[in-house]
Amino acid sequence: MTGIRNIVVLTGAGISAESGIDTFRSEGGLWEQHRVEDVATPEGFARDPDLVLRFYDMRREAIQTKLPNPAHQALARLDAAWKGELLIVTQNVDDLHERAGARRVLHMHGTHLNAWCTACDTRSPWTGPMIDRPPCPSCGARALRPDVVWFGEMPYEMDRIYGAIRQADLFVSIGTSGAVYPAAGFVRDARELRVRTLELNLERSQGSQWFHESRQGPASRLVPEWVNEVLGG
Ligand code: BV8
């Protein structure tokens, strides 16, 4: 892959599937077990906070028992070796990219491992449950919520993401169905900017037609192969 200096990688639940973390839309996936409206919206949280806090307590506990897979490890290898610009924009709220060693990671939908105090607006590292309404480490108020972006809420660092796409020579999408916006629109933004686009996914996503190239298969095989190509292995 010649002439590539700046890369933006978008990842979704599919990159963590082989680590044993449920995806959202697959058979038996999270959205089959729970109604999105009930567990991933501010309205759902206002209506039944216990339901929402239990949903995220369960997932927060689960991800801490999982390990990064070869796809996370390959992106961490790329991050360590790549001299050009690289930004790994993840829709995932797990910390497997970081646990694999990646550093240039941006969580556009937040993270499980932070608590967000709705009284003092402080975000604090958090690994335990929230169902018993523990006090905020900063102000003591019992007003914590998961630091995740719910439907209808603005994703994080959108300017930084659009800035990176504007500078990019290559946009790569890994393990995402292209069902949720604004993330699902990045490939079209990239195309309008004459950026090369590549999809690595188990199956063609809802936005496949927008990619110059789409490769199908498990991330644990496709991502190490692609990173070897880029690093000229
Ligand atoms: C917003 C955090 C205003 C919480 C999440 C335009 C058109 C239509 C609707 C909208 C629109 N703009 C906005 C909307 C509304 C809404 C939206 O998109 N609705 C959808 C349902 C139609 N968007 C919002 O509300 C967003 N906010 O728009 O604010 C705004 C507007 C403009 C600019 C700025 C702001 C906020 C959305 C964020 C919601 N929070 N997560 C939590 O995790 O609980 S979304 C959550 O679901 C994930 O983060 C992710 O984004 C999405 C799930 O998608 P995927 O990750 O792709 O997972 P999925 O299961 O769907 O697919 C997995 C894929 O992997 C599959 O393709 C499968 O084939 C593949 N796969 C599986 N195994 C493997 C694999 N691939 C490789 N290897 C494997 N082994």
Image (spheres, rainbow, N blue to C red):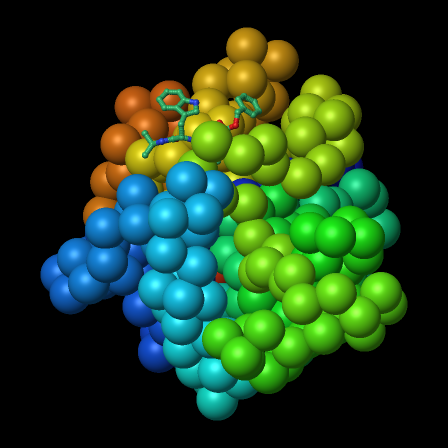
Can you name the residue that lies furthest to the bottom here?
65
Q: Is residue 46 visible?
A: yes
Return the x and y of residue 112 as percentages of the image width and height: 57, 66
Query: Residue at horizontal 85%, vertical 65%?
Result: 139
Instruction: Judge whether 30 appears above or below 211 on screen.
Output: below
Ligand 1: give its quadrant: top left
Query: Residue at horizontal 37%, vertical 56%?
Result: 48
Query: Which quadrant would the C terminus be assigned to in this image?
Result: bottom right
Q: How many marks?
A: 0
Choose top left, top right, bottom left or bottom right for residue 209.
Answer: top left
Return the x and y of residue 106 as percentages of the image width and height: 69, 50
Choose top left, top right, bottom left or bottom right for residue 142.
Answer: bottom right
Query: Residue at horizontal 74%, vertical 46%?
Result: 86
Q: Is residue 164 left or right of residue 223?
A: right
Instruction: Judge whether 70 appears above or below 51 on screen.
Output: below
Q: Depth check: 95 or 44 in front? A: 44
Query: Which quadrant would the N terminus be assigned to in this image?
Result: top right
Q: Depth check: 87 or 49 in front? A: 49
Q: Is residue 199 left or right of residue 32?
A: right
Can you name the residue that lies furthest to the top here?
192
Return the x and y of residue 16 as percentages of the image width and height: 43, 67
Q: Is residue 129 left or right of residue 27?
A: right
Q: Is residue 100 visible?
A: no
Return the x and y of residue 34 as percentages of the image width and height: 23, 58
Q: Depth check: 164 or 158 in front? A: 158
Query: Residue at horizontal 67%, vertical 39%?
Result: 156
